[in-house]
Image (cartoon, grey):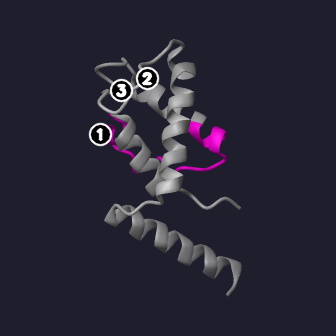
Amino acid sequence: MSDSALSSVTEAVATEAAATGAVDAELRGRIVLGIKDALPRVLGREVPEDLSNVCFFDDLSLTSASTIELVLEIEELLDIQVDVEKIALDDLSSMDRLADYVAGHLVEQD
């Protein structure tokens, strides 16, 4: 199979996984750890230990711009690329939502 055909298949699988909500659990776990690691740097302050019920906007005062900065930090930390063109405000609202979005919207790196 050629590289371009393999890339197309990989993108199709990633798109289907995102559409069905199926994401790699190990990858999602790494993303959650990346969020926890990067969030204090983006905010410039400490964050609660348990972020499971924290709303990024209401509880942590993140803006959509600073949340995109968080995504960029995660990309760098985990050496991944995320398709942010389809990201919605709701995808940025919490750690779980952001982790699901990132895990389901990876871009193949050349």
At numbered mark 1, what does the secondary structure look like: helix, strand or loop?
helix
Identify the residue at horizontal 47%, vertical 47% (top origin). Answer: 84
Q: Is residue 28 magenta?
A: no
Instruction: Estimate the x, y position of residue 93 in percent, counting from the top left.
Output: 32, 34
**72 vs 42: above or below:** below
Marked residue nearer the N-terminal end (3 or 1): 3
Nearer to the camera, 14 or 110: 14
Q: Nearer the viewer, residue 99 or 49?
A: 49
> 91 left or right of 31?
left
- The part of the image, by quadrant, that contains residue 76 is top right
**Residues tagged 2 and 1 counted as in contact (Cβ below 8 A):** no
For label 3, the residue is: 56
Report the amino acid beneath label 1. Answer: Asp
Which residue is at the front of the view, 72 or 39?
39
The alpha-carbon separation of the residues under discs 3 and 1 comes to 10 Å
Circles 3 and 2: CB distance less than 8 Å? no
Q: Which residue corresponds to mark 1?
A: 90
Ranked by sequence position, the earlier of labels 2 and 1 is: 2
In the depicted structure, whether residue 43 falls above or below residue 81 = above
The range drawn in magenta is 74-93
Q: CA distance from mark 2 to mark 1?
A: 22 Å
Kind of residue at badge 2 = Glu
- Considering the numbered disc 3 on the image, is that residue within a helix, a strand or a loop? loop
Q: Is residue 19 left or right of residue 72?
A: left
State the image coordinates of residue 4 (x, y, percent, origin top left). 65, 77
Q: Where's the N terminus, which quadrant?
A: bottom right
Residue type indicated by callout 3: Phe
| Residue on which disc 2 sits | 49
**Residue depicted at 34% across the width and 61% down the height:** 21
Q: 24 or 18, which is in the foreground?
A: 24
Q: Is residue 61 left or right of residue 1?
A: left
Question: For residue 41, which quarter of the picture?
Answer: top right
